[in-house]
Image: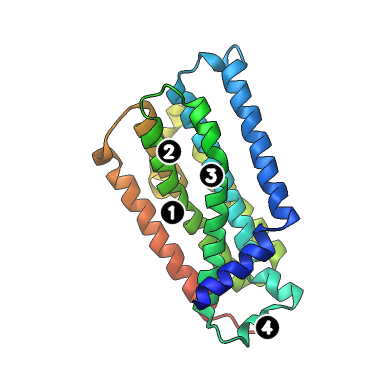
Amino acid sequence: MKTTYIMQKEIRESILTSKGFLWYTLTSIILSILSYLFLTNSELSLLDQGQMLYMIMNFITALGILMGLVFGSDAFAGEIERGTLEALFISPVNKTEIAMGKLGAAVTNWGIIFVISLPYLFVVGKGGQNLLIGIAYLAILGTLLAIIFSAFSMGLSARIKSMKNSLIISFFIFLLAGAPIFLSAALRKTWFGMILDLINPFADAINTFDSVVIDSQGFSYQAGRVAIICGYTLLSLWFLKRSVSRLEM
C-alpha cells in the first residue's frame, strides 16, 4: 500500500502535469509523422509491412528508454535539489518502498507511451502476418527495458545526487545503448558488433523484434536474448536497491 501511495504521488506530480501531457502530445505528433512518411513517401512505402512495423517498434522502444532515463535522473537527485527528499524520508515509508513507487510510476509512463503507439502500430503493420505477436513482444520487452533503464538511472541519481550529472551520464548510456541501430550490417557481424549486440539489452530487444516481425522465427530463437534482458532486469533492480539503501540526507 505504501509503495502504491508513492507511485500515485509520482504519477500526479510527474505524469499528470502539463509537462507530461506535452511529452505525450509530442510522442503522438512524431508517430503521426513517421506513419505518414511510411505510408506516403515513394521510397519508404516500398517497404513491406514487417519492415515498417520493425522500424517504428525500434523508435517506440528508444523513446521509452529515453523517457525512463530522464524520469530516473530526477527521482532522487531532483528531490535533493528541490529540498523535498527529507519529507519523504521522515514519512512512514522505507527507502525501498520509495524506490519501488518511483519505479512503478516510470513503468506507468512507458505504459502510456505504449498505449499511445498502438493505433500507429496497427496502421503501419496492417496486413502483416506478425503484427499481433510483434505488439506482444514490444509490450513485454519494452516493459523490461523501461525497468532496466529507469532503475539504473534512479540508482545513479541516488548515488550522484546531482540531476545534471545524472542526466549527462544517462544520455551517454542512451547513446551507447542505441549504437547498434547505427552500425552497418557488416560491422555488426564482426566480433565487436556481436559482443555489443549480446551484452546490450536494447540490441537484444531490437534483434528480437527483427527475428519475430521480419523473419517470423519462434520463441526458441528468442529465448537467449530474452533471458539476457531478464538478467539485466534483476541486476538493475539490485543496483537500485543498493544505491537507495546507501542514500542519506
Q: Which amino acid does label 4 sit on?
A: Ala
Q: Do the residues labelled 3 and 2 touch (CB within 8 Å)?
A: no
Q: Of residues 210 and 185, which is closer to you in this image?
A: 210
Give the Cα distance between marks 4 and 1.
30 Å
User: Amino acid under label 3?
Assistant: Val
Q: Position of residue 67 (x, y in %)?
A: 61, 52
In the image shown, does 180 or 90 lie closer to the viewer? 90
Which residue is pictured at 50% across the width and 54% down the height?
Answer: 146
Q: Distance between the residues labelled 1 and 2?
A: 14 Å
Q: Is residue 75 above or below residue 215?
A: below
The location of residue 79, given as percent across then percent down, is: 69, 73
Q: Is disc 3 surrounded by few (<14), some (14 to 19) or many (20+) residues within 10 Å?
A: few
Residue position for label 2: 135
> What is the spatial separation of the Cα atoms under label 2 and label 4, in whole angstroms?
41 Å
- The x, y position of residue 112, in whole percent, is 56, 49
Helix, strand or loop at mark 4:
helix
Q: Earlier in the sequence, mark 3 or mark 2?
A: 3
Residue position marked by numbered label 3 in the rendering: 115
Q: Is mark 2 on a helix, strand or loop?
A: helix
Q: Distance between the residues labelled 3 and 2?
A: 11 Å
